[in-house]
């Protein structure tokens, strides 16, 4: 997944196995940077407000993202993994808001771009993951 001055990435997780009345005490999105180096950067995670499919997504039909974001992550300056607290968004999805994942965007519109591992990464430990702790 590329994120940079002209690139967004999208990620979505199925949380339908968690009952609608559950209380989410914590939720963390984990992403792993797979390319070189660069100065400190922040990526925002904006909830998506409409449906999309991985195979049908391109720049001309990108889904709409929320006007603000509740979660962000500090991008490591070299290869490595980081997490973001996404509890607010996941709790909203469990409570019935539409779950179409997040748009990942850089808050700084200048290079370099950042490569995050995808679900196809050869190393399963590098793939994006969502960890949710909740009470039914």
Image (cartoon, helix red, strand yellow):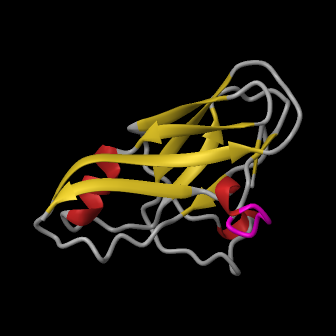
Number of marks present in the image shown: 0
* Left/right of residue 49 with respect to residue 40 in the rendered view: left
Give the x, y percent position of residue 128.
Answer: 60, 57
Give the x, y percent position of residue 89.
Answer: 33, 51
Residue at left offset 55%, top offset 33%: 73
Give the x, y percent position of residue 40.
Answer: 71, 19
* Left/right of residue 132 with respect to residue 11 in the rendered view: left
Q: Give the range drawn in magenta.
A: 119-123
Q: In the current view of this chain or complex, which residue is farthest to the top?
A: 39
Give the x, y percent position of residue 34.
Answer: 80, 45
**Quarter of the image holding residue 56?**
bottom right
**Quarter of the image holding residue 113?**
top right
Q: Is residue 49 above or below residue 29?
A: below
* Of residues 14 and 97, the one drawn nearer to the viewer in this rendering: 14
Residue 121 within the segment the image draws in magenta: yes
* Left/right of residue 48 with respect to residue 95 in the rendered view: right
* Left/right of residue 11 with respect to residue 100 in the rendered view: right
Q: Is the magenta stretch mostly helix, strand or loop?
A: loop
From the image, which quarter does the N terminus lie in?
bottom right
Residue at left offset 18%, top offset 63%: 95
Residue at left offset 38%, top offset 38%: 70
Residue 2 within the segment the image draws in magenta: no
Q: In this view, does 119 lie above or below 74?
A: below
* Of residues 29 and 11, the one drawn nearer to the viewer in this rendering: 29
């Amino acid at each position: 997944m590329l994120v940079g001055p002209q690139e967004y990435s999208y990620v979505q997780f199925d949380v339908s196995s968690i009952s609608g009345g559950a209380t989410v005490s914590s939720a963390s999105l984990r992403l792993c940077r797979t390319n070189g180096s660069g100065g400190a950067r922040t990526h925002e995670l904006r909830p998506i407000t409409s449906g999309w499919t991985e195979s049908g997504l391109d720049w001309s039909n990108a889904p709409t993202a929320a006007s603000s974001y509740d979660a962000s992550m500090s991008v490591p300056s070299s290869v490595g993994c980081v997490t973001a607290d996404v509890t607010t968004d996941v709790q909203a999805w469990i409570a019935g808001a539409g779950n179409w994942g997040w748009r990942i965007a850089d808050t700084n519109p200048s290079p370099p771009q950042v490569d995050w591992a995808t679900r196809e990464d050869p190393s399963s430990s590098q793939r994006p993951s969502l960890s949710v702790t909740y009470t039914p």
